[in-house]
Image: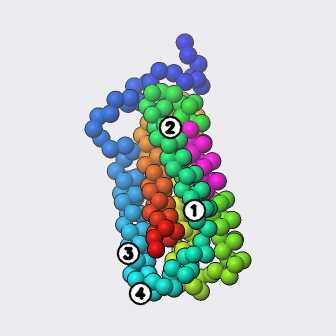
Amino acid sequence: MTAPGRDAPAPPRVRPVRDGRLPGDVHMWVMVLGDLFFFGCYFVTYMVFRALSDEDFSAAQRHLHTGIGVANTVVLLTSSLFAALAVIAVRRGAFGNAQRLLLATAACGAVFALLKAYEWHSEITGGHTVADEFFSFYYVLTGVHLVHVALGMLILGVAVRELRDPGKRRAEVVEQSVVFWHMVDLLWVVIFAVLYLMR
């Protein structure tokens, strides 16, 4: 008999074969769609202000550290891979592997936050503050996104905690945490394209 703490074949509560439903539950999807709507409105506002002051925005934009932006993008895309693999693992009943993958996902989030903190410090000490219109958008967008990264790490922690309890292991909890994390990654890709790349 397999010890309770070790990976075991999928129990009845784990669904290795999809039944056509969305991963997670409706509450998480409502939250995700609400966040996407909020960011979408802010992106539109940014585009309007940029169109009105294109030269000023372009000049300020050149002070951003594109290399750090690229590094953060790679880190979050890697985290999404870990998160997706965690869902596959938990559906197969490989709970230990799923825990490690979720922790790796959260570790990527921590690296992202450290890089962002370094970038903010560099920009602020360089005199680029919210007094500049472009940087006011930059700090709000990246700041609210960073809050979502922190919340995502907390949600991942809840999923890991459940996986450690043999009586609470549910694929749905891991799916919900990963759905939120993928949203965080998607938002960053758009933020990176809009703030760092668009000219």
In front here: 151 or 81? 81
Q: Secondary structure at mark 4?
A: helix
Q: Position of residue 110 (x, y in %)?
A: 63, 53
Inter-mark Cα distance, 2 to 1: 26 Å
Amino acid on which the number 1 mark rests in the picture: Gly
Is the image coloured rainbow, by chain, by secondary structure, or in one colour? rainbow
Mark 3, residue position = 44
- Decide: marks 2, 3 in contact (CB < 8 A)? no
Q: Which residue is mark 1?
A: 69
- Name which residue type carries label 2: Ala
Q: Is residue 42 above or below residue 164?
A: below
Q: Using the image, tell me which numbered label, if any, was put on residue 48.
A: none
Residue furthest to the top: 1
Q: In the rendered image, which quarter is residue 96 located in?
A: top right
Q: Is residue 181 above or below residue 102?
A: below
Q: Name the residue at 47% across, 59% down.
A: 189
- Secondary structure under badge 3? helix
